[in-house]
Image (cartoon, grey):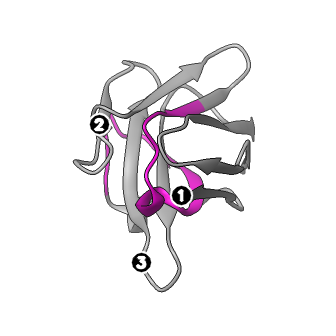
């Protein structure tokens, strides 16, 4: 089992920045890809960004490319999502998820093995 706990969600003004983090524990290893997804009210889960733990290969959705950056802290088993230039449409619950055994970033949420409980990010206009 792997546990994922997100933190850092907050209310920010449009144009501002925020960093959310995801702490992994349990049987977490370098064979995982960790991604951020988000879900806005009334909408489906949306892929945001992914990082392959072993290779540091990353992937971003078009909606956030150039504004968000995903990174990981190997010793502390944490994944960060730095969000800059926030827009009201970025408002959502942000979830981190772990996918075991992949060597390429994976955008399909239904293939992920573990999910966190989410952290709320609200961007005011």
Relative to 7, does residue 111 appear above or below in the rendering? below
Q: Secondary structure at mark 1?
A: loop
Residue 8 as seen in the image, left or right of residue 112: right
Q: Say whether residue 26 is visible.
A: no
Query: Could you tell me residue 34's position as x and y percent?
Result: 50, 40
Q: In which quadrant of the rendered view does residue 123 lie? A: bottom right
Q: Residues within 10 Å of mark 3 (few under 14, many from 20)?
A: few
Q: Which residue is mark 3?
A: 44
Q: CA distance from mark 3 to mark 1?
A: 18 Å
Residue 105 as seen in the image, left or right of residue 86: left
Tell me what residue is drawn at x 37 percent, y 56 percent. 47
Q: Residues within 10 Å of mark 2 (few under 14, many from 20)?
A: many
Among the two numbered marks 1 and 2 on one chain, the one whose residue lies closer to the N terminus:
2
Furthest residue toward left: 62
Furthest residue toward top: 75
Q: Which residue is mark 1?
A: 113
The one of 67 and 43 positioned closer to us in this rendering: 67
Q: Secondary structure at mark 3?
A: loop
Tell me what residue is drawn at x 29 percent, y 36 percent. 59
Q: In which quadrant of the rendered view does residue 65 lie? A: top left
Q: Secondary structure at mark 2?
A: strand
Tell me what residue is drawn at x 72 percent, y 50 percent. 10
Q: Which residue is mark 2?
A: 59
For the record, the magenta segment spans 80-107
Query: Could you tell me residue 44's position as x and y percent?
Result: 41, 78
Q: Which mark is residue 29?
A: none
Disc tally is 3
The one of 35 and 39 positioned closer to us in this rendering: 39
Among the two numbered marks 3 and 1 on one chain, the one whose residue lies closer to the N terminus:
3
């Amino acid at each position: 089992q792997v546990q994922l706990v997100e933190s850092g969600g907050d209310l920010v003004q449009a144009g501002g920045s925020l960093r959310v983090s995801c702490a992994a524990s349990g049987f977490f290893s370098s064979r995982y890809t960790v991604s951020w997804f988000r879900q806005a009210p009334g909408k489906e889960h949306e892929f945001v960004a992914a990082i392959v733990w072993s290779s540091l290969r990353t992937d971003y959705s078009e909606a956030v490319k150039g504004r968000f950056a995903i990174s990981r802290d190997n010793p502390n088993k944490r994944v960060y999502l730095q969000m800059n230039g926030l827009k009201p449409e970025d408002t959502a619950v942000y979830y981190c998820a772990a996918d075991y055994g992949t060597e390429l970033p994976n955008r399909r949420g239904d293939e992920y093995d573990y999910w966190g409980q989410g952290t709320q990010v609200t961007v005011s206009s």
